[in-house]
Amino acid sequence: MQLDDFLNARSIANLQILQWIWAPATRRSASKHELLRTLRQQMLTPERAREGFLNLGEAQQEFLRGLLRLDGYEGEARFLLRRLSTPPATAQAEREIAEELDRRGFVACSTRKAWGQAEALFVTMPAELGDVLAEVLNLDLRDPALMLSLRAYLARRSPDERRRLAGANGTPETLLADLVRPEAVEARIAALPSDALRRAVRLALDDHGGLLPLERFPSLGLDMEAVDGSAWRSALEAGLLGTFGHLSLLEHGLGDDHDCLVLYQEIVEARAAARSVEGPALDHTYACGIDFLTDLMAAVDFLRANPSKLTAAGRFFKGARNQLLPQAALRTSFFMDEDSLLAFKLAAARELGLIETRDDGRVSAAPGAAGWQNGPLVEQARALLDALLRLAEGACPAVHLRALARIASDVLLAARPGVWVPTHAFLARLVSRYLLELLQREAPQAREPAAADEALWRYPRALRTVAAVVADAREPLLQALNYAGVLDIGRCGGESFVAASPLAPILLGSAPLPVPRGPLLLVNPDAEVILFPEEGHLELLHRLCAFCERGKNEVTLHLRITQESVQKAVLRGMTPDEILDTIARHNRASLPQNIEYSVRNWAASVHPAKVCTLHVLEVHSPEALDSALRLPELAPLVVRRLSPTAAVLRAPQLGPEAEAALKQLGIHLM
């Protein structure tokens, strides 16, 4: 909207009020033409624009700052109000802010249809007035891509400038790779003009993912008095390290909207990748492998044989807990104690649809759980990873967590197992890639509309900043990747490290499971099964856990065949021949005869049964039922004949075709 159109749309009375606000020292105008000329002159004077802005309340000033960052200086009022540091308490207070700005001549208010066809209040500032205000307020309205991406910054430089930066022995194509090398970055940091700037840059690069908001300087021990925004921006951009200014990521779904020191994300990622260490001396390693998966299925098997009630917190009562914990391969983890971990396994099983709560309040295995449990290891592990990531979405906005999880999968797939990197450096790589992806999108990320329009007014929700997203996603994301077996976690002193596990290329990529080169089992007469953890042992371990109880994990893995474990396997659908064939094929010696006898005897003692609801069709004569059972419309519904005059049906009622066929036989349903 142009200023002339903005003013022409107002009445004489309103223009006279604007003259009193913007030009109190001028004489009263007699005509509208004179009013328009006076107001245009005064409103586009930088000193008057600054004075008028400073006369506003704090909330109104913050509202206008947000409006000045929008394209065309136009936006929906409620979205701007939701971004205020202290949102108004009521809808009336929100409307008063916009209407007061309209009365003072800063914006024009209009009601239009918004998304969802609901009426919404929009505000528009004249383009010329917006440009003047942005200039006098020194608002930094730069494109976030130019502040965060070295590639985007170089693309804006002239070809001659890029060739000059590449040097005599380089090319513009290799310039970016040369500029992000840690040695080159360190040299450019050392060349910065002040100690305060060098310290802030190193702190941002090593601990804050390249984004260091100005308001955090005091809490980090940085001297605010030493900050010279203009000089720092010039030095950082001249050194091709980053910039200093106002960064706004609101249009990309993130809440960052502040002055900060910004380092190019390509430099942050390269620095984080260079911190990899091969074979560090770790105090402890948390490598789950397939242990979480096998423990989860052991819990499902237990609930199939022993339906149990859970506490209000979703945990087993003491009796069931004491039966399950000794059989768990993964009793504690980097994140949880044994009780919390056992409850989390149940949550994952429920997310996978493997357990359900019965009418009597007890939890049991779902009807389709056995089929899933007998599936291939890789399919189960991938489904588990998806379920764990869905559970993690409760702690972090789903749109951010899904993107970070996808990027983490790419990073782990490209990494070599056993190469460790500090956890904060790993997360910095994920966030750097995510930010660069967001900036490369043509359209800003769409936001999900609220379920009800009223909720937007009464419950404003601020967008999460990059730092808050990292804090929210850190533990849930690492936990999901660790429990799924694709990420190993190590601890050394007070620092944690992460590395891709040997399962990462299999579950995240298309690498096949290794095949054992020879027998890996030793089965003792006392039913102890010893598994040698050589190449290709995971699939066999997955198979053994279906009918064995886990024992101690030392140099070798110890399991035991028990009556209870065999009975649970039979309830899952396994036969004694499948059990015996598995251990016989992989045993390094002949199978003890007592093992075969015990397995068959234990399996024969199990008789699966189920309670189901059926419906009975009853007629008065056996001959009539004989005729009815021969009907093709009725035959698929018949389970069996109970008596000469009654038959069991699967359906609670018959369809119109079956009912019509019975009527032709003279059988009428009552």
Image (tube, helix red, strand yellow):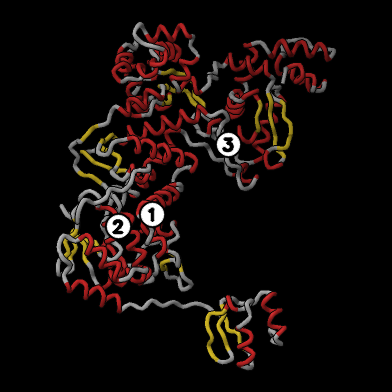
Q: Within the image, what quadrant is residue 499 found in?
A: top left
Give percent across and percent down for residue 565: 28, 69
Badge 3 or badge 1: first in the primary sequence: 1
* Circle 3 residue: 446
Disc 2 vs disc 3: Cβ atoms closer than 8 Å? no
Q: Within the image, what quadrant is residue 207 found in?
A: top left
Q: Residue at x 65, y 33 (%)?
A: 77
Disc 2 vs disc 1: Cβ atoms closer than 8 Å? yes
For residue 183, side relative to residue 61 (left or right) = left
- Residue 542: mark in rendering: 2
Q: Residue at x 31, y 58 (%)?
A: 294
Whether residue 64 is visible = yes
Q: Is residue 623 above or below residue 369?
A: below
> What amino acid is labelled 1 in the image?
Gln
Q: Is residue 593 above or below residue 648?
A: above
2 or 3: mark nearer the eye: 2
> What amino acid is labelled 3 in the image?
Ala
Disc 3 vs disc 1: Cβ atoms closer than 8 Å? no
Badge 2 or badge 3: first in the primary sequence: 3
Marks 3 and 1, how far apart at CA: 33 Å
Residue count near mark 3 (Cα–Cα under 10 Å), binned few <14, some 14–19, many ≥20? few
> What amino acid is labelled 2 in the image?
His
Marks 2 and 1, how far apart at CA: 10 Å
Give percent across and percent down for residue 153: 47, 17
* Circle 1 residue: 380
Q: Residue at x 54, y 15 (%)?
A: 138
